[in-house]
Image (tube, rainbow, N blue to C red):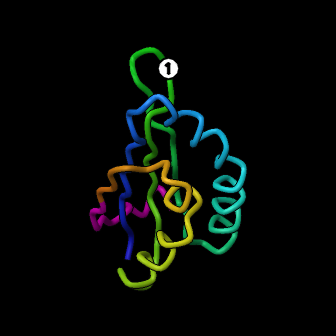
Amino acid sequence: MQYIITAYDGTDEQAIDRRLMARDEHLKSVEKRVKDGQHLYGAAILDEGGKMIGSMMVVEFPSKDELDNWLKVEPYVVENVWQKIDIQPCNVASIFR
């Protein structure tokens, strides 16, 4: 099943620092999931000034339980970068695959 993940960073003064400290590990985990076919698309969400304030990604996991297991080890979750996470099932059109 495919899912859209929309995750927003905290809004406290240390939020960008937490993001930047966890970013390398997050990107390494994205690379692994791309190779495994689990991570289809992704982007940083920016505010009007161009500052990163969250993430959007489309992922594919056999079940919601497996997606939840990934979130337990996702660096942006572990390091408390993402403060709000919305998950919606989706179906990526075949033209994009």
Q: Answer left or right for 51 relative to 35.
A: left
Q: Answer left or right for 13 relative to 29.
A: left
Instruction: Point out the residue furthest to the front here.
Output: 13
Quarter-of-image position of residue 10:
top left
Q: Which residue is mark 1?
A: 50
Q: Is residue 89 found inside the magenta-colored segment of the image?
A: yes
Bounds of the magenta span? 87-97
Question: Residue 12: percent from the left, percent from the top?
Answer: 41, 33
Badge 1, how many Cα within 10 Å: few under 14, some, many 20+? Answer: few
Q: Is residue 96 found inside the magenta-colored segment of the image?
A: yes
Q: Answer left or right for 13 relative to 90.
A: right
Question: Residue 16: percent from the left, percent from the top?
Answer: 54, 33
Question: Residue 23: percent from the left, percent from the top?
Answer: 65, 46
Point 41% across, 76% down: residue = 68
Of residues 18 and 94, which is closer to you in this image? 18
Point 37% across, 50% down: residue = 83
**Mark 1: secondary structure:** loop
Q: Quadrant of the N terminus?
A: bottom left
Point 59% across, 35% down: residue = 17
